[in-house]
Image (spheres, rainbow, N blue to C red):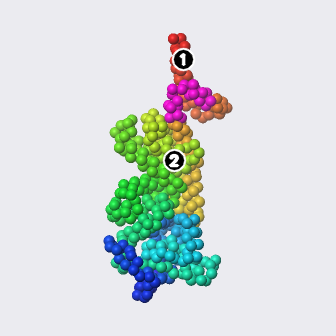
Amino acid sequence: MTTQERKIKIKEIKDGTPVATGTKLKYQGEIREFNVYKIPIEFLAYNVENGRISSLVKSYKREYGSLDVNNEKDSQKIAKFLFDSNEQRNKKTLKDLAENGQLEPGIITMDGIIVDGNRRASLLRKIAKESDYDQTTKDKCSYFLARILPEDANEKEILRLETSFQMGADSKVDYNPIEKYLHTRDMHVKKFTLDQIAEYMGFDSAKDVNLNLDIMELIDDYLETYGYNGIYTRLPRGCEDDFLKLNTAIKKVQSGKINWIQTDQLDEVETDLRNISFDFIRLEEKGDFDFRAIASTSNQNFLNDEETWNTFADSYNNLIQDFEEEEQLEDVLKKAGNEADVYRLLNQRDKKWKDEIREGLMSAFNDSKNIIENKKSKEKPEELIKKAINALSAIDLNSVSQSNKKPELLTKISILTKITEDISKALNEELCS
């Protein structure tokens, strides 16, 4: 159904008898009364800019092009995005709708675009079309109860209403973390003030809005680093906390509150911090790895100690100076025949990167972690000597003889020899005194 056809149908319904009257809604700055109408599901179209699925829609557009709500195939794609956004909750809502029908009215525009209720409408449509339900249930779910906005509803007012209902009242917890950052940025681009965004999204203050904008900027910077501009589905699962920690560390660097960093070093340290943190976020390392060791400024973490940070940053920069990914994103997209191919090939691209860089990254991390731990034990020489003996005893001499880094190893052995000589000298002096 075209936009114009929907508009004609909606007007006919609005000119008819409502199923409820006098429901209140804040519209264009004032509380107004709206009637509720019973609208056949087929007369409606999803809001492709729905904040609940913003990351999925933006990623899809970046990879495949636009989504047309008037196209049935694209409409089904949007419905799938809505269902997949929170499958567990949607299954529960699906059951409730089948048993009790729609209890709360949604909001639509005069041309049938759903402002509030996209998820419920998609589930009603699912029930009405599936064979698992009896005809009475299907008939009950073949309509959507909604208030119809005036024809003068503009894009900004529609976004305000969606935000107030979905992210302010309906619970931000129901949204994937990336969606709240994208939605904050979208509202900021649409010229909403920080205080308005905070009010409509249910934040405590404008400070929370600024934090969201900072995290969104970091996320975009991260994706751009790996050629994934605008493909928010390439963000690792559970990465939100890492970006929050990184943002805090960057702010501390920028403010000059880390004593050892000179003013002319701030940009260099921040750049290294971003690049290193991005690589470890992409690596998704588990086990003994703790992201806080890199992007946190507490006493026992890398950034708070000049020697540790410089050792870590130098090791990292030496590792990546000649590293370059073989395949660019556009090359991958050209090779893919369908969406499954894109997903598989991009996963392969990430896996290849991880396989090639993991050992070097973790070696740099563990070396710096050992420096920190050894500094904590500097007043206990017997513990450090025991650790050194255990480490050296684990070396396979056959591997040493076959190493292609013999000059580098010999240099380090010379350093080790000098250290042991100094320790022996200090001990002998103490015994002789």
How far apart marks 1 and 2 lie (CA) works out to 42 Å
Amino acid type assigned to the residue bearing label 2 in the image: Phe
Of labels 1 and 2, earlier in sequence is 2
Which is the main secondary structure of the residues drawn in magenta? helix
Residue 321 seen in the figure: no
Q: Residue at x 55, y 50 (%)?
A: 284
Amino acid type assigned to the residue bearing label 1 in the image: Leu
Residue linked to disc 2: 280
Asked whether 354 falls inside the magenta stretch, the response is no
Residue linked to disc 1: 427
Q: Position of residue 418 (x, y in %)?
A: 53, 22
The residue closer to the viewer here, 204 or 229, is 204
Mark 2 neighbour class, 10 Å CA radius: few under 14, some 14 to 19, many 20 or more: many
Q: Position of residue 184 (x, y in %)?
A: 40, 61
**Secondary structure category for the residue under label 1:** helix
The residue closer to the viewer here, 279 or 303, is 303
* Vertical comparison of 87 with 428: above or below: below
Quarter where residue 287 is shown: top right
| Outermost right residue | 398
Q: Is residue 392 left or right of residue 3?
A: right
Q: Position of residue 134 (x, y in %)?
A: 62, 81
**Secondary structure category for the residue under label 2:** helix
Q: Residue at x 51, y 45 (%)?
A: 291
- Of discs 1 and 2, which sits in the foreground? 1
Q: Is residue 136 left or right of residue 150?
A: right
Which segment is the magenta one? Answer: 370-391
Q: Residue at x 46, y 84 (%)?
A: 19
Mark 1 neighbour class, 10 Å CA radius: few under 14, some 14 to 19, many 20 or more: few
Q: Position of residue 91 (x, y in %)?
A: 58, 69
* Res. 136 mark: none
Asked whether 378 falls inside the magenta stretch, the response is yes
